[in-house]
Image (tube, helix red, strand yellow):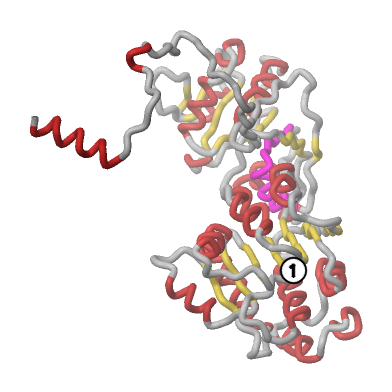
Amino acid sequence: MWLEKLKLNKQLVRSVTEAGYLTPKEIQAKTLTRMIGGQDIIAVGPEGCGKTTAYIIGVLMRLKYGVEEAPRALVLVPDKERVLEVTEMFHRLNKNESIRIVSLYATPGTETQMNALADGCDIVVATPDRARAIYLKLGLNLNKIMMFVVDDAQAIVKQGLQLPVNELANSITKCQHLVFTEVMHSKLELMIDPFMNDAAIIEVEELTEAKAEVYEQLLYTVPNFKTKINLLNLLLGEQAAKNKMVVYVNTRLTAEKLYNSMFQGVKKKAALLKPIFFESAGFEHIDDFKDQDAYSILIVANELQVTTDLYRIDTIIHFELPVEKETFIQRIVKRDGQDLEVLTFSTDHELADVRKIEQATGKKMQVTELPENLIVSKDVKDAEVKKRPMPKNTEPVRGEAFHEKKASNAKTYNISASKKAKMNKKKKHG
């Protein structure tokens, strides 16, 4: 199938089939021809859809032989574990012993990795920060790079490694750029836009068959945590007081922070499950909250690991997604005789977790427009603040902290270093 559909060389077909890949997956079928042709690609697909195998085959097809001392492919991944996984996959599919692969990740000292590069290699698999560090030490030669690959791009952005990715990309004169990610969002686009050239965007979705019926879910995508708070205040303020609502966050500290960030009109109807601080309104059990008419909002921390009985609850809001997707899914499985409204708040960094939940449930969340009167807070970390150059011949601004020098203190001459030393010596011994 590989030979007929994608025209791979026989040696690579043999190693791919021996590794258990009997037929190309959708993302491989859609990307490999373009990769071999040298086109820039942005490939978007869920975990396990075959993105990594796609670019490994593409790299091995394009390089074919190990002929250069300098590397010809640079693959960037988020962390050491991923470096080792990708390197192992390269070795499994690479039957050509002349193609050499070097891994770069954080270890004490850089000498061993720099020596491996100096011995000659064709493919470098690295974390962005380590690759940049060795490049700045003149240990990584980028002059011969043909293929620049960013894998798990959404995780690289989540870890804040955009700067080394951009610096490495800008240090390469001309090459093919390949970006593989689970989701696309504005922060990721900001990272890759400077170096992508008329990229083909290829997206695949592989939803599993639903194992259980789940409630309809509404998804609000917001830029940051502060905007989540603004949205929550807005939505809770509009809800009728008789509705019972549960808001899920990840930690009890976040629960306290959220409680104290609520508008006064909302806060008086809110309580916490097992609060940390004595002054916070709270309950030890969710049943106590259900029986109280004075409170309509309960904030629950996922770290408590309590199974919340959602009977008699009208709405649940995932202010933050739980670490384990199974926790989320357990809450949204339909129950006989109960109508439940499910809302989820997600920043760009959490969209990959949203996709994993959709994959597991076989059901997409319905993206909902943000309210027109929502105040969207600025994300200072992601704002690109450009320093304005000072205009030439500009006089300093004279304000309250500015004082003209006295004529007697004005310096209109220069003293040489040797003369200063002699003067100081005289003062010390005078």
Q: Considering depth in this image, is 383 or 134 the residue closer to the camera?
A: 134
Residue assigned mark 1: 50
Tell me if residue 293 can be seen. no
Residue 1 at x, y = what percent? 87, 83
Relative to 62, is 245 on the left or the right? Answer: left
Q: Considering depth in this image, is 390 or 259 the residue closer to the camera?
A: 390
Asked whether 414 falls inside the magenta stretch, the response is no
Region rendered in magenta? 340-358
User: Which of the 4 quarters of the picture holds residue 243?
Assistant: top right
Residue drawn 74% across the image and 47% down it = 189
Residue drawn 78% across the image and 53% down it = 362
Asked whether 356 falls inside the magenta stretch, the response is yes
Q: Considering depth in this image, is 301 or 31 the residue closer to the camera?
A: 31
Residue drawn 68% across the image and 50% down it = 352
Tell me if residue 178 can be seen. yes
Q: Is residue 91 above or below residue 47?
A: below
Q: Residue furthest right?
A: 4
Number of callouts: 1
Category of crowding for the residue at label 1, using alpha-carbon neighbours closer than 10 angstroms: few (below 14), some (14–19), many (at least 20): some
